[in-house]
Each structure stands twice: as structure tokens, then as C-alpha cells.
Amino acid sequence: MHLADQIPWSEFEKEYKDLYSNTGRPAKPIRLMVSLLILKQLNNLGDETVIAQWIQNPYFQYFSGECEFQWTAPCDPSDLVHFRNRIGEDKINKILEVSIKMQGDKISKDDIIVDTTVQEKNITFPTDVKTRVKVIKKCNKIAENEGIILRQSYKRITKKLLLLQRFSRSKKQKNKAAKAKSKLKTISNRLIRELERKLTEERRLYYQPQLEIFKKAVNQQLFDKDKVYSLHEPETACIAKGKAHKKYEFGSKTSLAVSKKGNVVLAVATFKGNPNDGQTLSATFDQFIKVNGISPKTATVDRGYQGKREVNGIIIYYPKIQSLKGYKKQKEREKFRRRAAIEPIISHVKHDFGMLRNYLKGHEGDIINSVLACAAFNFKRILRKLEKEFSFCLNFFKQIFFVLKLKLSI
């Protein structure tokens, strides 16, 4: 309730009112839609589950601007999808900007800490066999939707070939599994070519981008660049972060900028592909200036950014203490020890606020989800501060009540 009273909802009204028309069916209130997005990330919920909890939770309803308890859903879950698409990746930064402004003037924006992480996409672990089977199923579905009669659907044969893959690591079944894998590739290419022949000119142009993805996914080799790891999310990248428990992660690289004092997320930038950490600094600083209106003076990073000493006039510091000795080495260690504070922040943003696995579609979905997760982290910081103040006041009144009770008893 206290957080709802502190958020300047009028700023969202001013920012998003130009995206709406004065004619047609009235839209849902902007405060309602923004509050649902914040509640979704704060509680790590989905579009459907946040609506279900909104009906049951009076605090959610008060946060959304309701004065009386409501017994029906405020909107359809799909309205959240349409609202995210409406505001887009440019306007979503307003929520992060407001979450930073609410922290007060004590947050230092001159010295920041920057690090990267991986925002994983909601896809299965990619293998050649899985991809080829999916291509076969999708080709059959396209043929069914367009009324095309294929020479053969290969549904039964696909099942038999999949069974042979179960023992692909066995010495006896290894050759059979390799042949089955090759056969699946042949069938996939055959169905793609047949669709290209039998589709009309207009429909072939419509399905051409999809068919090109199918071709690339089926025929790609082990060491090819820009591989397709998911048919419905072709922009997904394979990123190796050197983790012992997880060698590869499939998603998008995300860079976070955190204040050196206060642990507030000041900027977040999401990238296509797998750029080097040093190449992400320029875009991260541009995003920082866009959200905060000022430029930082220094940035502290880890050794993954080696080679960068200055970017856009901002001085870059990273640990390089092997050649130092004695007092200087100790002082440098103390300086960079604070850099490690960003690691638990990244962990909280991922595990508590929905950035661990992204369910939103496309690269724009990556950007929106990462910004909302970081804004939710900042709002949670304000909530913890309010809880401390409330508990302090409660304890103070308890002590007064106890003293008065003693005096009355005497």
C-alpha cells in the first residue's frame, strides 16, 4: 500500500497517452496495465497467474488504483501482451527510470559496476534430431492448412527413426542411430522441397522466411556460425559463460549497470548474438544516459573486459594486481572487492524477478523482460526499506505501551 502511494502514476499517463487513440472502444486504464506488469515481475508470476491472484488479493487491487474490492478479472491475460507490444522497447524504459528516481538523491551515479549475464530463452535443449522432427511436423501442418496433398507424411517412419535414437551411445546401436539421424535429414529436406513446388506463388512468398529457417536448421553443420537453435526463436544464441554446472546457455546476453553505493540497477542492455563483453560497454553506457540523463565517470568491471581502458569518455577499471606488491596491492584489492556485489544482484534479478527464463517472444521480448526484471528489483528495495521503517515504528509503540502498562500496574 505504501509503495502504491509513492509511485508517481501520472508520469506513466503522460508517457503513454500518445500511444492511444481518442476514438473507438475505451482502453483499460494505464495505471492498471503498468501495475499489473510491476506485480507480475515483483512476484515472478505469469500473465494468467497475476490476473488470478489479482482477483483474490486486495493489496494487488489497491496497488492498481481500485477503491473497492473487485470480484471479476480486470482484463484478459492477453491484454498484457498487447500492452507490452504497444509500449515497445523504447517506452518500457520509463518504468525503470521511475524505479531509479524513487530511490532518492543519495544513490551515486558517477561510479558504477558493470557485468554481463545470460537471459535464457524458453526453449528445449537443441539437438539435430529434435530440430529435424519438428521441421517434419511443421511441414505437415503447413500442408494441412494450405490443403496440399503430400506424397507421404512420414509420421509413422519418424516414430520408428526416433526409437532408434534411444541407444545412440551404445556400441551395437551406434551405426543404426547415425543412419536414422541421416534419414530424418533426408525426409526434412524432401518435405521442404515438396512444399516449395506445390505452394502457390503468393503463399510461397508468405512462407518463404519460415522455409528458409527450416533449411538452415536441417542442413547446418557442427562448426557453422549463426546456427538456428530454435524454430520459433531463431535469434537465440549459444553462449558459454564458463560455468561448471552448465557449459552452454541458450538465450541473449544482457549487460547490467549497478550503482557502487546502494545496489540499485541503473541500466540494462540486451544484445543479439554473443558479443564479447568489451563490445557491450558502449551500448550499456548509451542506455545508462538514456535512462538517467547523465553519464557516469568511471565503471568497474571484471577481467572479461580486458583491453578496454576508456569508452565514450568513461574510465574503465578492471583488476590487474599481479604485478603489484605490498600496500599498493592491498589498496587495489579493496577497490575491486566492491565489484563482486553485482554477482548476487544478478542472481536475485534472475531467480526472484523472472529473468532466469524469458517467455516473451523475439528480441523485443528479451529487452522488455530484462528491463521489467531490473525495475522490479529496484521496487523491491523500496519495499524492504518501508518494511524496516514500519517495524521500527511498531517496536517503538510496543515499548511505550509496555512502559505505560508497568506504570499502571505499580
Image (cartoon, rainbow, N blue to C red):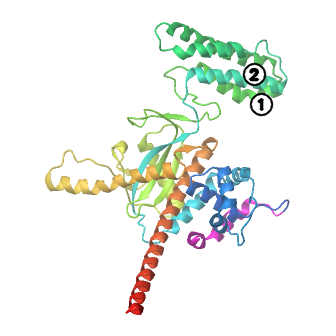
x and y percentages locating residue 366 in the rendered image? 58, 45
Q: Residues within 10 Å of mark 1 (few under 14, many from 20)?
A: few
- Residue at 47 percent across and 12 percent down: it is 170
Rendered position, 396 above or below 15: below
Magenta stretch in the rendered image: 1-22
Q: What residue is shown with label 1?
A: 206
Asked which secondary structure carries label 1, the reply is helix
- Residue at 61 percent across and 16 percent down: it is 162
Q: What residue is shown with label 2?
A: 140
x and y percentages locating residue 399 in the rendered image? 40, 82
Depth check: 365 or 208 in front?
Answer: 365
Quadrant of residue 277 within the rendered picture: top left
Q: Is residue 79 at all visible to an observer of this figure?
A: yes
Q: Is residue 20 magenta?
A: yes
Depth check: 259 or 171 in front?
Answer: 171
Residue farthest toward the front in the current orientation of the protein: 409
Q: Amino acid at mark 2?
A: Asn
Rendered position, 344 above or below 362: below
x and y percentages locating residue 224 in the rendered image? 52, 23
Q: Residues within 10 Å of mark 2 (few under 14, many from 20)?
A: many
Q: Amino acid at mark 1?
A: Tyr
Asked which secondary structure carries label 2, the reply is helix
x and y percentages locating residue 66 in the rendered image? 70, 69
Mark closer to the observer (2, 1): 2
Depth check: 126 or 329 in front?
Answer: 126
Horizontally, residue 193 falls left or right of residue 358, namely: right
Q: Is residue 54 magenta?
A: no
Residue farthest toward the left in the current orientation of the protein: 326
